[in-house]
Image (tube, rainbow, N blue to C red):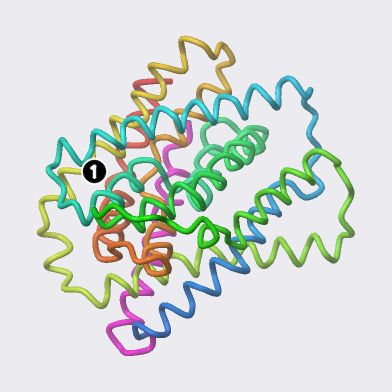
Amino acid sequence: MDVVSIFEQMLVLLVLLVVGVIAARFGVVDNETNRRLTRLTLIIPQSAMILNSVINVDLGLTFGKVMLVVGSACAMYLILIGLSFLVPLIYHVNPTDRGIYRFMEIFGNVGFMGFPVVASVFGSTAVFYASLFNIPFNILAYTVGIALLQDDGQKKHIAFKKLISAPLIATFGAILLLIIRVHIPDPIADAVGMLGDMVVPCSMIIIGASLGAQSLREVFCDWHTYAFAPARLLVAPAAVWAVLRLFVKDSMILGVATVLAAMPVAAFATMLSIQYGGNERVASKMVFVTTVLSVATIPVMCWLLL
């Protein structure tokens, strides 16, 4: 396990986040600009990143092995969903915020941070495993995740038409590409890859700008943030490892699942909160604090569990 590479990856994300904070402080990015950038990032670069994870990929795996990986990913998210129902009860979360807390327990920073960390721990061949884990991640994030963000503690009917989004459509497109294995012309594949590469800097700047609009003293001094962090960074990977090891005998698949479950709160928690009415202040604080703390917790969890 290359601890230095993991630390450097975290540091890159933190630097981008600080750029967003500075941009907000100096008026380069205001709330309206942040909302527009959020919408742009979710519709185009995020969709491109999902498609790019399967475009022209040389599988080198049997169909049965692919199904085992996807099945393990589904099991991992079932475990995390189960944990998410305990979080509001344990932390006595305000009913209006219970949806965002459940969202943050389920969805870690898989796409932005998980892939490079998996590569650092297991090598480049494991990155494709991580991309298969992204299939149920994206389906759940843009259906269940959005429904959670719209949960304000009141019983109401959620219009499922509002859950249809460009990233969700891209996810089903990625599944189709994975099945038919059609070759995409290089110019198109390269363009999709370049658009997908925009997600990391854009998302971190969006989060930083959202933080920059808040009092940094409030961000660092909110004890709720530090109280929740162990649930995301320690309990989630430990629970996934403890359950999956009973059924999954492939050490690579078990390792990828554990590492991805150890990621900090998903960076797009802030973007989706802005887009769908979640508490973006809570999301931004949790993304920032858990990202900082994960510099220590990810290597520790890998050492303890793997």
Tell me what residue is drawn at x 42 percent, y 56 percent: 158
Tell me what residue is drawn at x 48 percent, y 30 percent: 1
Q: Position of residue 119 (x, y in %)?
A: 57, 39
The residue closer to the viewer here, 238 or 156, is 156
Residue behind mark 1: 229
Does dot 1 land on a helix, a strand or a loop?
A: helix
The residue closer to the viewer here, 141 or 263, is 141
User: In this rendering, is residue 188 above or below 34?
Assistant: above
Q: Is 186 left or right of 32, judged from the image as shown?
A: right
The main secondary structure of the magenta stretch is helix
Residue type at tag 1: Ala
Q: Position of residue 98 (x, y in %)?
A: 24, 49
Q: Quadrant of the C terminus?
A: top left
Magenta region: which residues? 1-29
Q: What residue occupies the far bottom of the structure in this picture?
A: 27
Q: Position of residue 138 (x, y in %)?
A: 56, 47
Tell me what residue is drawn at x 82 percent, y 64 percent: 188
